[in-house]
């Protein structure tokens, strides 16, 4: 069965068919605590993009029952994305390394430890504001306030909205390194904010500068 798919490595949108995907399963009981047949399903997808052809691996584990002569997963217990190790976007080198590193690590541990992920994202947000806008104050909340008259209202409203979310907001008033209790959805909102800011600020600036340099070079050659 064909389905639409976006590669987490190259971002290419494509249609996956039987030529690009494989799967297999292991069933067992072995006296497990669930006292029933268990199953582990493994699936692989190879990106159809000839310039990528990366491999994505996923696993699903749960209770199994016979259906159409084969064991099928009937109740999911746990699932994993084995490759890539996270869904972090691959940002270019002109985005400062500390920002990329904090973002990538925050993505990797979002589900394992949402509170640690949020801590890294808050530090990443402060790093972006300080590096890109040269705003340096004692607290992240003060830096966000100082940013208001420098960016478009929609972007600032999104930053401020995330700042006000539950525990995240409460501790943005204090040290960014304080670890707070957050759920995976809140941690994901912070990650999506970081992604948006990197795209709208660093990447947009780079593309604009490259385009202007191309125009200037063309004019100089006349």
Image (cartoon, rainbow, N blue to C red):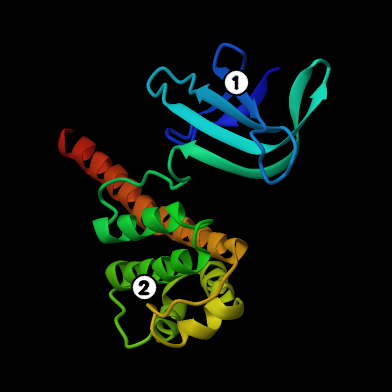
The answer to whether residue 134 is left or right of residue 167 is left
Separation of residues labelled 2 and 1 (CA atoms): 44 Å
Q: Which type of secondary structure does the marked residue at label 1 adopt?
A: strand
Q: Which type of secondary structure does the marked residue at label 2 adopt?
A: helix
Pointer 2 residue: 126
Residue in the image at 26% along x and 47% along y: 93
Q: What x and y, as percent, mark residue 153?
A: 54, 72
Q: Residues within 10 Å of mark 2 (few under 14, many from 20)?
A: many
Pointer 1 residue: 24
Q: What x and y, as percent, mark residue 7?
A: 50, 32
The answer to whether residue 206 is left or right of residue 159 is left
> Tags 2 and 1 in contact by the CB under 8 Å rule?
no
Q: Is residue 58 visible?
A: yes
Q: Residue furthest right?
A: 68
Q: Residue furthest front?
A: 31
Q: Residues within 10 Å of mark 1 (few under 14, many from 20)?
A: few
Name the image quarter holding the N terminus. top right
Q: Which mark is residue 173?
A: none
Q: Of 216 and 62, which appears nearest the observer?
A: 62
Counting every numbered tag in the picture gives 2
> Which is more N-terminal, label 1 or label 2?
1
Placement of 161 over or under 69, stated as above or below:
below
Q: What x and y, as percent, mark residue 152?
A: 50, 69
Q: Nearer the viewer, mark 2 or mark 1?
A: 1
Residue in the image at 81% along x and 24% along y: 66
Residue in the image at 37% along x and 21% along y: 51
Q: What x and y, as percent, mark residue 57?
A: 50, 31
Q: Quadrant of residue 220?
A: top left
Placement of 220 over or under 1, stated as above or below:
below
Q: Residue furthest left?
A: 221
């Amino acid at each position: 069965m064909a389905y639409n798919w976006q590669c987490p490595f190259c971002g290419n949108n494509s249609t996956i068919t039987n030529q690009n995907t494989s799967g297999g399963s292991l069933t067992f009981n072995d006296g497990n605590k669930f006292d029933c047949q268990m199953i582990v399903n493994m699936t692989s997808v190879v990106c159809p993009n000839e310039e990528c052809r990366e491999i994505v691996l996923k696993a699903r584990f749960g209770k199994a029952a016979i259906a159409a002569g084969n064991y099928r997963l009937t109740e999911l217990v746990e699932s994993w994305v084995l490759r890539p190790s996270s869904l972090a976007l691959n940002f270019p080198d002109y985005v400062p390394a500390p920002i990329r590193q904090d973002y990538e690590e925050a993505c990797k541990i979002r589900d394992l430890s949402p509170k640690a992920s949020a801590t890294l994202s808050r530090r990443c947000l402060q790093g972006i504001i300080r590096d890109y806008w040269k705003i340096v104050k004692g607290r992240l909340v003060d830096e966000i306030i100082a940013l208001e008259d420098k960016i478009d209202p929609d972007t600032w409203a999104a930053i401020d909205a995330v700042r006000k979310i539950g525990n995240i907001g409460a501790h943005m008033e204090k040290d960014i390194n304080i670890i707070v209790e957050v759920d995976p959805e809140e941690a994901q909102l912070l990650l999506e904010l970081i992604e948006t800011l990197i795209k709208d600020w660093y990447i947009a600036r780079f593309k604009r500068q490259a385009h202007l340099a191309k125009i200037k070079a063309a004019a100089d050659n006349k």
